Image (cartoon, grey):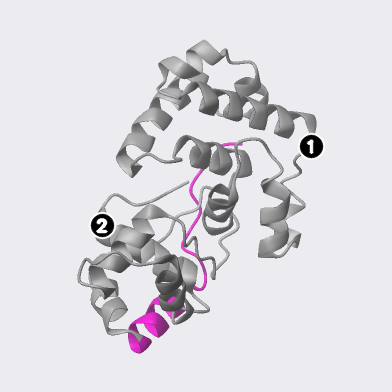
Amino acid sequence: MSGAPVGKPHYWDQACAELAAADPVMARLVGTLGTSHLIARGDSFVTLARAIIGQQISVRAAQTVWDRFAAAAREVHPERVARMRESTLRRCGLSQRKAEYVRDLARQFAGGDIDPRALPQLDDEAVIGQLVEVRGIGRWTAEMFLIFNLLRPDVFPVDDLGLQRAIARHYRDGAEVSRGEALAIGESWRPWRSVATWIMWRSLDPVPVEY
């Protein structure tokens, strides 16, 4: 499980063109992207472990913790991570709870309770339903998996705080948006809500969001 990045999603250019054509805000933001695009690492365990580590912290902080974790693990592989001590994980910057979650995730992969080969055959809600059964994985983490590992084009993580802040900035002149308002705006981005969400993230932070 190398977690090596894979190429640009096949739908990316079409999605950006259609979003820009339908939405002036998107047109402006797409114009600032250059050649940037969503990157998937192609490794189910790495994606989920990164998403758990990234829960409720900034992109930059998550990357710092991940780099320490990857260095300590030497190989980010379920069998290896399952044997790591929680104290080692804590020294990398993981909270006690996240350390427990990452080790439990590793054990489920190593033991075959999670079969990454079966997940691509499921629709979005079925994938979410299966993953949220895993300790430490809620809907947001499952949505990150859909976007960054399975490259599903129309996922809308409405409860993501960064997404909410970006919508407020670009569509409401900075005024806070309700969940319902965010959902309504997201409806206009179908069937490319994953792409629109990624563009919203990038509008707040130039560091690419990757899991």
Q: Earlier in the sequence, mark 2 or mark 1?
A: 1
**Residue 25: where, in percent of width, then height?**
27, 78
- Mark 1 falls on what kind of element? loop
Kindly identify which residue carries mark 1: 113
**Residue 105: where, in percent of width, then height?**
65, 32
- In the shown orientation, is residue 57 left or right of residue 5? left
The three-letter code of the residue at mark 1 reads: Asp
Judge whether residue 196 is colored magenta: no
Kindly identify which residue carries mark 2: 204
Residue 204: tell me if it is visible: yes
Residue pictured at 66% horizontal, 35% vertical:
135
Residue pictured at 37% horizontal, 36% vertical:
63
- In the rendered view, tell whether residue 194 sits above or below residue 75: below
- In the rendered view, tell whether residue 2 sits above or below residue 191: above
Start-end of magenta stretch: 1-22
Callout 1 crowding tier (Cα within 10 Å): few <14, some 14–19, many ≥20 = few
- In the rendered view, tell whether residue 112 sits above or below residue 183: above
